[in-house]
Image: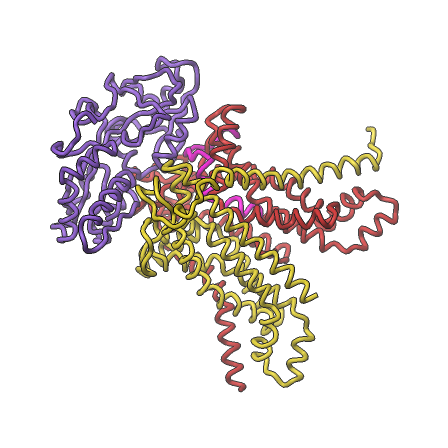
Chain colours: A purple, B yellow, C red
Amino acid sequence: MAGSTSIQPIAELLADRYMAQHAGPAVEVQGGGSSAGIRAALSGAAEIGMSSRQLKPEETGLKEYLMARDAIALIVHPGNPVRSLTKEQVRGIFSGRVQRWEAVGGRSGAITFITREEGSGTRGAFEELVMGKETEIAPDGIVQDSTGAARAIVATDPDAIAYISLGMVTPEVAAIALDGVQPTHESATDGTYALTRPFLLLTKGEPTPKARAFLDFVVTPESQATIAEEGYIPVKPAGRGSGA
Amino acid sequence: MKRLNPEVTQRIATVCLWAAAGLALSVLAYIIILVLAKGLPVLTPHFLLASPERMGRAGGIFPTIVGSLALTLVALVVATPLGVGTAVYLTEYTQPGRLAAVIRFGVDCLAGVPSIIFGLFGFIFFVIRLGMGWSVLSGGLTLAVMILPTIIRTAEEAIRAVPGSYREASFSAGATSWQTITRVVLPAALPGVVTGIVLAIGRSIGETAAVIFTAGTALRLPTSLFASSRTMAVHFYILAREGLSMPRAYGTAAVLIILILLINTAANALMVRFRARTQ
Amino acid sequence: MKTKEWLIEKTLLLMALSAVAMLALIAIFVFIEGTPIMAREGLGHFLLGRKWAPTKGSFGIFPMIVGSVWVTIGALVIAGPLGLACAVFLVEIAPRKVADIVRPAIQLLAGIPSVVYGFVGIVVLVPLIREHLGGPGLSVLAASIILGVMVLPTVISISQDALEAVPRTYKEGALALGCTHWQAITRVILPAARPGITVAIVLGLGRAIGETMAVIMVVGNAVKVPAGLLDPARTLTSNIALEMAYAGGDHREALFATGVVLFMFIMLLNSLAALRFGRRRPSP
């Protein structure tokens, strides 16, 4: 399987569990990004593609399996007093219209915003869900090619803001509320937090028996519990430990 | 304008030059100490010999050590004969002329090609066009192209340094030029040739950009030439970038730095011995 | 015997052509992938366009060209004088014992993997710049400093060769005329070594413009023309490495086209070094 680097960590983990329980051929997990995962599934280079964004209308011919959902959180430095922004303010910041923290109720300072590179599934989802059709992410932003790098900058720069997977939020950074809703496991699961995207597994036509077995494994209660433990939103709540 | 006394200028200049060399050395020392101070505590046999768990957040780096070694080995197996052959041709078979100039220009240019271009080329040529996929083979062959100039140049210098009297003695004993090369010249030049190979190993192990797009990033132990493999340098990059585990990132960096230190020391020692022998 | 020797010679010739053949292969394949999109977009639009949004059909790499030029010049401002000073020190000033320590140390500096440089940049240099000079820290300045250190060994070893190649008699003559050692260095040795030093600088430029992994970590990668040293920027190399993993179709072609531009820059510098000055450089 190949594709989204956002799904890769959890897919690796599940693949390890799967192989520990099932004899037979190894499950190999490659990164490459959502678009590469979709192409790999289409071309047959991978038996399973991984995409962390919705398929585009022109990307047809694939069967989709929803494995989990992921919330995208906006993060700032823990010392930043701003703890809530509206979607409109976020759009303003990332489009370059709002350049200073005092304009959104913070202390005086220039905003450093960090975005992901073109082609990233996280960026694609952020553009789709926050920026909308009309506004674009301004070119002035720092561009980082990984969630960890974006988080590391926010952890050290009091003026920085970035968007990352909720599952990747650590205490070094503060996740802030969007339109008054704090991103948490619960708010993302019940849908009150709006910024979520699907983690899709893709096969070209009917999956091979080997792929089928893994796809089934992913939605077992234990696997879904693992997904919840890692900070993602399970699609089958059955196996979820309560109050996570 | 008042001119400084030349003696005073001389003294100031000398101080500045010492300072410049001191600055270069302290940058080096700083980097090494920083990496080793934070990395050495992580270096346990377990870290070196265990497989990574949870994308490298836990466990060791064993598969990436194997990955680095496998890629380097493929690169050397291909580049060493080609490189030494080229050096022999340039030194023993050509007169300075147009052909030699073209070959040298090619070698010089190849040496100047940035590693990201090798990465692009390896990706489109080995991975895609030749259908090798992200694999040890694709990555190793890409590295082979990259280290070829290093091997050619050091081998050429080493062969050139073999005194002409060796060859004359061999010829006068009735040997053919090929016999002279294999039995007299190459053995005499061996330490120099090996220095080049050792330096090439250093470059291969430290390389990231050319490898990440050709060998892929799979964290499993590579079991065949066609398996994707992650090298130590790529693993370090991903650990540090993704912020998966800083202690393990430092640990991996420490292994890299120690290897580079060993490799450079070995190359130096060989070079000193070689110079002592040919002079 | 004759045919065997002939066979050996031709085999060696084939091997010797391998480097040239590889260079040609690299050029051909990068060009095949990269040039169609340059033709479709128009060379002018591609090179001078300021908007890079490859997933939305805008392919302008002007900001990356400017970014690469800034960062490279910045690196040379640091590595040029410092490298030359170190070379003069090694050749003219250093006692033998000191030189024997400094020389391999400089080689070691060349052996440290670029990812390690980038890492040190991000954990040490970037916060330093952000706290003391302002801006996001990830900047042209940070990349210049890191690259400056990285190209230092290239500049030093080639300048050193150039200085050593100056005949001893030049220096002895100057000293005999009553010059101080420093006067001999600045008025006689350095001018005589100038062509070699120029080659050192040109090849240093080549290494700086081609460096990727260290730069991607510290330069900030913003797709805009930097307005100052403390601004983030994106280089040609970081553009390729940053987006290559995700790219397909036109996007991938545009990244190969970025590679074509980089390749042309490098070949230009290499040709300058190799043809104009007609002298070989030592191994890196």
Residue at the spot x=83%, y=42% of the render?
Answer: C180
Residue at the spot x=23%, y=33% of the render?
Answer: A229
Q: Is residue C212 magenta?
A: yes
Task: Name the foreground residue: B160 vs B18.
Answer: B18
Task: Name the foreground residue: C158 vs B222.
Answer: B222
Q: Which contiguous range is marked in magenta?
A: C204-230
In this view, A187 is above or below B37: above
User: Residue A143's x, y, as percent?
Assistant: 39, 33
In this view, A200 is above or below A183: below
Left or right of B104 in this view: A184: left
Q: Is residue C34 visible?
A: no
Residue at the spot x=37%, y=55% of the render?
Answer: C32
Q: Is residue B155 magenta?
A: no
Task: Name the foreground residue: C53 vs C22.
Answer: C22
Task: Name the foreground residue: C122 vs C158.
Answer: C122
Left or right of A43 in this view: B159: right
Q: How many marks?
A: 0
Q: Is residue C6 visible?
A: yes
Q: Residue furthest right?
A: C177
User: Residue B82's x, y, as percent?
Assistant: 49, 67
Left or right of B201 in this view: C255: left
Q: Quadrant of the C terminus of chain A?
A: top left
User: Residue C261's x, y, as percent?
Assistant: 45, 47
In this view, B177 is above or below C74: below
User: Residue C84's x, y, as percent?
Assistant: 67, 44
In this view, B174 is above or below B129: below
